Amino acid sequence: YARACQLNDENNRGEYGSLLAPYLCFGFISSAEVASKVLNAGRSMQDTTAFLKSLARREMGFNLVNSVADYDDYESVVPQEYRDALERAAHERDAAGNVAEISEEQWERGETPDPHWNAAQLEMVKLGRDLNTDRAFWCHRMIEMEANPARAFERALSLNMLVMLDALDPVVFHSIAEYFCKSAVEPAEQMKLSAADGALAQPNRPSMAAAPAASRGAVEARQMESNMWNALKASGVEDSRARLLNKCGAAPGGKFVLYWAQTAFRSTHNDALEVAKALAARAELPLVVADLVDLGQYQSFSKRHFVFHLEGVAELEEQLGLDGANFVFCVDPPDRAGLSLLGDPALGVKGLASEAWAIVTDRAHLQRSRELVELVLSAIDIAMIDVESRLLMPLEVLANPETLVEPDFSAFYERFNANIKRFAKSLPPQEVGLKQQVSTDLSVLGYHWEFEVHGAWSAKDWLAHESERDATLKACNIDISVADVTNAFKGGESNAKRLLNTFVSRVLFGYGRASEIHGEKNRKEYGSLLSPYLCFGFISPAEIAISVMRSGKSPEDTSSFLRNICKREYAFNQLYFNPSYDTYEGCVPAEVRHILSQRSSKYSYSDLEWERGTTHDQRWNTVQHELFFKGRDIVQDRRYWAQKIIEYEKDPANAFRLMCALNDKYMLDAGDAVSRYNITAAFLSASLGVQQVAAVEDSATMSSILEEEITQTGLVMAKVRQVNELGPRPSVEHGGSSQYVLYVANKTCRLQNNKAFELAKALANRANLPLIYLYVMDLYVFQRGSKRHVNFLLEGLAELKNSLLEIGVKLMFRVDPARYGEHGCGGVSILGLEEEEIVGFASRAWAVVTDRSHLRYGRSCAKRVAGFAGCSMVEVEARLMVPVEIVGNAAFGTLEEFGDRLFSSLGQFTKPLASNAVAIKASSRKLKLDVLGYQWDFMRGAAAQWHVGAWFEHSEMLGAVLRESGVNMNAVADTSVAATFGRGGENEARRALQEFVSERLRGHARGGKDGAFAKLFAHLAFDFNR
């Protein structure tokens, strides 16, 4: 095999392949089973290694589609330098008259001027497959015969999709991109493409830094960058936290280093402050810390928030004075943000920036703060550095590699856990001798109010002079009717640390259960109460995480709390990368707005009635009174508070406005991203309540069940993900509406070695419910394919149906028209569609289990199902040997590099997989499943919806359905491959594997060819066969 798969001219080349690619593509067999069979076949090291290359290469294809959003776009997967080379070669051929005019039909039928290319194309048409080197040659010659490389790329994808049975496997996209890169650097005679070669360059990432201001000079800018890195090293701050926002140097005559505090008002564990200290020490200048309050930010809040901030800043000013730093406190008018920093000669304000050597600031996240930073950058000509001091991890570390905003919290949580040890590190204050005396009068640099006759007041002065403060706030349209909460919550770093110590020592024990389970007796007391202190920057999330991780409490308690820290980071991700987060249309998806607009409300309350808590709902009134008087609530109360406003308010848009207004006016943590994101999340939850019978509101119950069942079945937790925040829907026996556990098959159409199916069986037994196996053939997926793919799938499903019946599981098969996918509404048979009176299978499910989707459309459908299923949804990695997050990255190195990561990780994913019997047979319950899912017009009035076999029996109707949805039905695409290739299905896949191992794996190995890859066997010191 090793020799045959490398040599183009090997006589038996046409027969050496395993022919398993289509079966792996449709999930009729698992890659782990194939690897196990090959490893235990007793063949030579070289032959076995050569085949493992093929499996690793396939998994590498999944890495591409998970890392690059537009994996089927020429410019996204073929780097610029290769595209340039291909363009130059195309122009040269065109100038020499070597480009032929070939119609699309000629391409499809293999009627080009090149007989060798035609032979390869006709083999694909006839057999639905090719051999690796044929496809490489096929792509290369297509590039040479086509004048436009981009058009050649599109044609390669379209022809591949049309006739190749494995066309829907991610490895195909990777292979074609790889062949185009190879064609840019190799002539045709060298197109023996080794599977170990071919690297795709990392796609361009958008720059995350702000636009640069005017430059003071390249030399000064480089020097400032060097100063920043040295300051980071000296302070112990993680490099990725800091960014030089412009290309300016330090001001030559600057008199101090300015730390403009925006979100971190604390003296310890303050990354920005430590960087500023290090810079000041390096420049041998005093450090000035400035809090320049923008009253415009408080216009949507109230006096409560301003007083809480003043309390903390007064404490900070005293502490910084003891540490040797200077402190300036200024309050800028609402319409003059940045006045004390930038100055205004007309008002006699010089501005702190005019005397600063360089500026360090906290990174801004919310829109108004970011706009202020942009304003400052456009006006200054000195270096400005921002430091991430509000979040545990910088936004870019946890952002989606392609889209930045992360739609999947589970994926976000995985990245959070992978990086927590890197960022949850102590940050001891530097013991540096700061030069304290400033050679200028700081008190006259900022803005002064008329009553500040002897210079700017300190925060303590603003607290003491209540009448002047309240009059100023009122004049600036800031609500002063909301009382402060000093008796319950006093701002400041010391109070935050006291609450943290109390929480860790007294409350963290049992937090995992108390924070999640409804009805817990001590639920009112489980919270850390730290949210307002995080919001105002009085304590660092890193300090909290470290204390919790070192507490010695149970993993359940610590991980539950850290998950809430992660949710806060997730909220910032959602808001930072969405500039319209503060509008109803901008943060609530269109489909959610549509669902909510359809429901009606029988109540009508004024804003004042809502604010005073005088509705008919006494529980809601109680929560509102707690907000009114205490400025905080508990998470589950806030969720109830928000959802009931949506339920009772006639206009959802007005409900959004009202929630934002009440939240901002009364909640102490209203200025944090998590506060606003919780409102958005409430609208999604409310839409679920309209569309489905709601499950329990949190996922703790399912988390606990999964931990037990995963252990018993032999699955690995890293392969299982909860993809929404819901628990199981109560069963009919317990007063609910669920009747079964639903397994939705995406690409694992098999009974054996199916991790997702085994977990579904375990959950069905746990719930004491039958298991329904649902396959929805979404014709939108097959629009780029053909009837050939549909037939191959139906053959396998027909076989699977009989196998499932033998173990008491019912296979339900539905065919969804392509029009739903075209409009972004995939998964109609799963979710239903109220306007068309379609009831989805998910509406009666206790929980939904599915195998993980990897291609773009499948992922979008999975996200939609997770959002609207109304119950817990669990995803299992059942296609890959190792989850892509464990071994993948966006760098796309060589196959040897990828294989090294793959096989070094493989041992932990090879635990024995127990196969359980189903306790409750589907046939024992009257489930009335035929009324569920999409039903075609020609089925209406029939006793039951068509099963898989019926679609085969009505081939003419099947053809009509496929044509209606735009599935290719031309002569080329309709060619049957059953006689020459084999039928679809699990048994046929296993027969092909056995035949390959026994007859074609043993070959003439080429010694030394695969030496580097063979070294990976050192990692395979485990019993794969188990």
Image: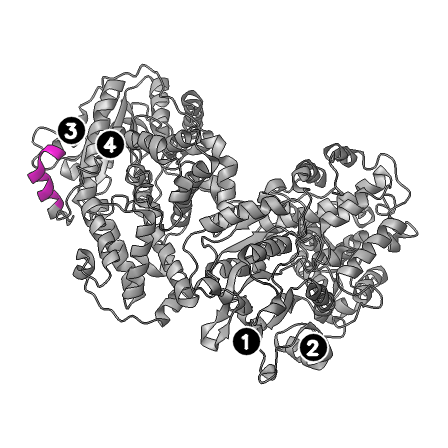
Local secondary structure at mark 2: helix
| Eye-nearest disc, 4 or 1 | 1
Amino acid at circle 3: Val
Residue to which mark 4 is pinned = 492
Dominant secondary structure (helix, strand or loop) of the stretch shown in magenta: helix
Q: Is residue 46 left or right of residue 763?
A: right
Q: Give percent across and percent down for residue 339.
A: 21, 39
Of mark 1 and mark 2, the one earlier in the sequence is: 1
Amino acid at circle 4: Gly
Q: Residue furthest bottom?
A: 941
Asked whether residue 637 is drawn in magenta, I would say no
Number of the label disc, if any, that sits on residue 993: none
What is the C-alpha distance between the residues marked 3 and 1?
77 Å
Tag 4–tag 1 contact (CB < 8 Å): no
Q: Which residues are magenta?
A: 463-473
Tag 3–tag 4 contact (CB < 8 Å): no
| Eye-nearest disc, 2 or 4 | 2
Local secondary structure at mark 4: loop
Q: Give percent across and percent down for residue 29.
A: 73, 55
Residue to which mark 1 is pinned = 931
Q: Is residue 957 left or right of residue 564?
A: right
Residue to which mark 3 is pinned = 444
Which class describes the residues within 10 Å of circle 2: few (<14), some (14-19), or many (20+)?
Answer: few
